[in-house]
């Protein structure tokens, strides 16, 4: 593969090179890349939503098995996911990248291609950022601006006793994908002609390497006229997020182990690793599914929407945070966030 | 000094600890830290301005001589400076920090104290961010949201022939401060009881370690009813920024060496280092002064404002980018950005 040194393009040349193909899609983006700041317009009644995420090599990703394009895609999508979790629409993105001399222009192009693909898929404009040298490794920091009507915004703190607790998609797959990638990396250790054993594990690998944000679920809820009472995206694991909703709303939680949505590949992998499946689903992290609560009165409506699972209900605060196991035992939910990064927002 | 390990507080505990004292100041900040995204409201006619900056240890700062509190302050101020350079007002800030195990809770507190002090001075709300582990060193990424009426926004591309080229404050001081700090660091090299030679150099050290954004200049221009035709902040050096204004506006530049504003301490330090003073002023970087152009008709008004220096005027594009030396020689301006980081915005 061709390798162009970053120094050969010059710093401004690199930026022009990377952002030449950026076309603005949103009428609200009045000015994108190229000035001291981007300029954004919001229609009357619209509020701005702002979320940010930092991804560091060796902490949040391992380039041994993470293609740079996927990394770019994922770094954008995890920000979009936070905007959807507010019941909003992502519109603009800024990207700051720190790269050591180990990376070539082609490497950074790959990251940008991933980011710009995600922007195309989700209708978001890349409006600014930094590209900077770093002494060691790769560092990505993205900030997403979204919008929502004030009355549509869903916070974490609105859950009320008797509300239904809902989850989109399935849980634990990204975590099991990570376990598989780590195992194959350990087996590999520089071996020539190494062929990793990925057959039949495509779904969990994709969940780890190329997650999607649940734009579709937010749209389906809107079409059905359902506004969740509380909502978050699941980035640190279901348990951790449930406790956020409980603390923010001063309510109790009661969920059922046998209701947790888990894909067949996730279950098979957990068995192969001799891991507890519920633990993976509860604490796995990086699912980027939506966790939300809706009033009990909307039970029929919510059941009609494909891709949403009811996993329990909100209780009084005094009733605590309870996981009901398959044998009926009640276990207190504990947050075991798997991730080194804890977001203030997101 | 007390040292608390980050692990002892827990990740969410650390965030609560750092952000407990954050009080929101702007009515437009509807929701700050504590949800998937911050929520911001803009009054009718107001546009959002967004700028972002990444600061990496060993590239943008050296902790040998940079106090962490100053680093926090500066990292916020450089973002505010970009918003003022659009003729806007900074309102909200997000902060992502990556820290290795070398840093304690007290260290991160120092950084946050600096950031929050800057937020207080400039009336900005801290509304979100990340705190994350890193494998090596310290990494800061900040995004600032500002606002401005659409008709007040000043872009880089509005300069017209005969416009006056103006600069606030003085130039080259931050660069000479950096040279001094680097020299004393080289002399120090682990020596015990080392007393760096900083007497009489307070101004250039402060310009390097604790720069301010020129909020005052933006306000004075507004009071005088002067809207610049083009404006930027000087972060990469005057030459580099002048060429941005020239290219964006498709105009020529003519500036005069003997008009460049330079402080006495900067000149004395340059002499001590046997450096060309004009080179320091033209290419030094990190001045965070405002570079702007105003119509020739506003000559009298602009001269009445303290702290602004006229350094030349805009010419036709065909006339090129000219520095007129003290002896009348004409030299072509070249960008020699000193900084490893080149911003897409900012």
Image (cartoon, coloured by chain):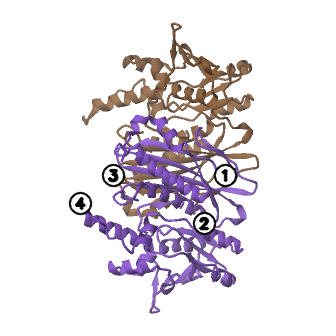
Chain colours: A brown, B purple
Is residue A26 in view? yes
Q: Are marks 3 and 2 in contact (CB under 8 Å)?
A: no
Label 1: which secondary element: loop
| Residue count near mark 1 (Cα–Cα under 10 Å), binned few <14, some 14–19, many ≥20 | some
Left or right for B340, reference B91 = left
**Mark 4: few, some, or many residues within 10 Å (few <14, many ≥20)?**
few
Q: Residue A193 or B221: which is nearer the viewer?
A: B221
Say which label, 4 or 2, has the lower sequence index: 4
* Residue placed under numbered mark 1 in the picture: B26
| SS at circle 2 | helix
Co-location on one chain, circles 1 and 4: yes
From the viewer's side, name the closer residue of B161 and B84. B84
Q: Mark 3 points at which residue?
A: A102
The disc placed on residue B215 is 2
| Label 4 in the same subunit as label 2 | yes
Residue B78 coordinates in the image, percent (x, y): 51, 61
Circles 3 and 2 on the same chain: no
Of badges 4 and 2, nearer the viewer stands 4
Quadrant of the rendered image containing residue A272? top left
Which numbered disc, 2 or 1, marks the residue that appears first in the sequence? 1
Question: Rounded to the nearest whole Å, what is the CA distance between mark 2 and mark 1?
Answer: 17 Å
At 57% from the left and 54% from the top, the residue drawn is: B144
- Chain that bears disc 3: A
């Amino acid at each position: 593969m061709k390798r162009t040194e970053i120094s050969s393009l010059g710093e401004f040349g690199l930026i022009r090179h990377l952002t030449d193909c950026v076309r603005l899609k949103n009428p609200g983006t009045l000015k994108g890349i190229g000035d001291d700041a981007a300029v954004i317009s919001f229609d009357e009644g619209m509020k701005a939503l702002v979320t940010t995420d930092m991804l560091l090599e060796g902490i949040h990703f391992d380039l041994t098995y993470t293609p740079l394009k996927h990394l770019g895609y994922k770094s954008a999508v995890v920000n979009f996911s936070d905007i959807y979790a507010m019941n909003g629409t992502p519109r603009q993105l800024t990207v700051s990248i720190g790269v050591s001399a180990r990376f070539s222009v082609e490497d950074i192009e790959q990251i940008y291609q991933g980011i710009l693909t995600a922007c195309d898929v989700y209708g978001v404009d890349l409006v600014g950022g930094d590209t900077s040298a770093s002494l060691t490794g790769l560092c990505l920091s993205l900030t997403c601006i979204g919008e929502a009507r004030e009355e549509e915004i869903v916070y974490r703190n609105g859950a009320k006793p008797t509300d239904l607790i809902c989850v989109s998609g399935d849980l634990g797959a990204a975590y099991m994908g990570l376990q598989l990638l780590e195992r194959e990396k350990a087996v590999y250790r520089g071996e020539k002609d190494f062929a990793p054993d990925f057959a039949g594990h495509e779904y969990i690998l994709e969940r780890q390497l190329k997650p999607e944000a649940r734009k579709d679920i937010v749209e389906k809820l809107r079409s059905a006229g359902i506004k969740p009472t509380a909502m978050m995206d699941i980035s640190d694991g279901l348990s951790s997020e449930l406790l956020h909703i409980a603390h923010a709303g001063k309510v109790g939680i009661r969920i059922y182990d046998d209701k947790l949505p888990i894909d067949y590949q996730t279950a098979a992998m957990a068995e192969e690793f001799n891991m507890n499946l519920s633990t993976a689903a509860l604490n796995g992290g990086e699912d980027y599914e939506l966790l939300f609560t809706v009033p009990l009165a909307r039970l029929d409506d919510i059941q009609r929407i494909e891709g949403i699972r009811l996993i329990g209900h909100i209780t009084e605060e005094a009733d605590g945070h309870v996981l009901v196991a398959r044998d009926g035992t009640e276990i207190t939910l504990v947050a075991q966030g798997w991730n080194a990064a804890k977001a203030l927002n997101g």
